[in-house]
Amino acid sequence: MVQWQGTNFTVDGHEPTSAEEYYRIGLHCWDSAEHRDAATAFLETAAANGHSAAVELLGHIDYVRGQYANAVPRLRQSTGSPRAAYYLASLYHQGCPQAGIPQSLDEAARWYRSSAELGEPEAMLALGDLYLERLLPVTRTPAEHALEYFLAAAARSHPYGQYRAAEVYRTLYQDAQSAAALYQACVDNPMTARHSLGSMMTLQSQAHLREISANRTAGLLQQRRDAVNPPHHRGDFY
């Protein structure tokens, strides 16, 4: 067994001997509120022995703790990690003097694209915002580029992706049917309640769904009026 501050740690009852086993202990500690502070000790042992997932997780831990100078080398090592690429994109997006990273939207976009290609919906959302703000070169309209990324995030059941795609359809395309489907998906999404903007998205989506429904009903009634009382006959009666 191995000890950390008086607590014994084993893997299936035996002392860890491989990088994978040290990584498993480190991951368990990071996921445990009780032993979270022990995680880095075990992960660093695994990383020193070439365990790539341990390096990636250490980069994540440093990033969320705001230790960016330590995080960046580990994030750069973590090729193939959507999370690592997204963190690097975020650092370039804002600039991080602490880690020696200048602000660069070109570099941010490059890393966001790498992360998005690996399936990270947060990177897709960030790219959509950059296109809507006309901060990236376009080959189509900014709205087309943005909608592509918002829909990609929505396809991964990301509630904010669903909401943002619905907003683009409603405001920029006047496509009420597509907007309603995505607003409803956002309302029905179990992850919406856990999102930091969950309450806002739910309330706004419900309000827009009511408005779209009311407009649809009004349109159908007007079609009925026009059918039974054609405009060119109305002067005969009123």
Image (spheres, helix red, strand yellow):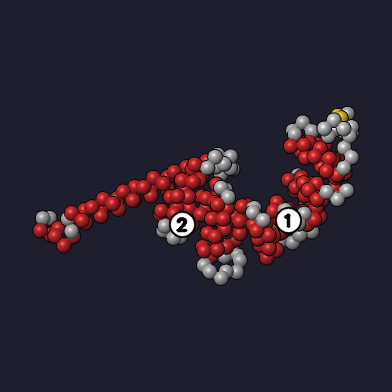
Tell me the tag on residue 169: 2
Residue displayed at 83% across by 34% down: 11
Bin the neighbour count of mark 2 within 10 Å (Cα to Cα): few under 14, some 14-19, many 20 and up.
some
Q: Secondary structure at mark 2?
A: helix
In the orientation shown, which residue stands out farthest toward the bottom?
139
Query: Disc 1 marks which residue?
Result: 80
Q: CA distance from mark 1 to mark 2?
A: 33 Å
Percent coordinates x, y for residue 60 in the rendering: 75, 47
Residue displayed at 57% across by 69% down: 138
Count numbered badges in the picture: 2
Tell me the tag on residue 9: none
Question: 15 or 115: which is nearer to us?
Answer: 15
Could you tell me which quadrant the N terminus lies in?
Answer: top right
Could you tell me which quadrant the C terminus lies in?
Answer: bottom left
Amino acid residing under circle 2:
Tyr
Question: 190 or 163: which is nearer to us?
Answer: 190
Percent coordinates x, y for residue 231 in the rendering: 18, 60
Q: Is residue 115 above or below residue 138?
A: above
In the orientation shown, which residue stands out farthest toward the left?
236
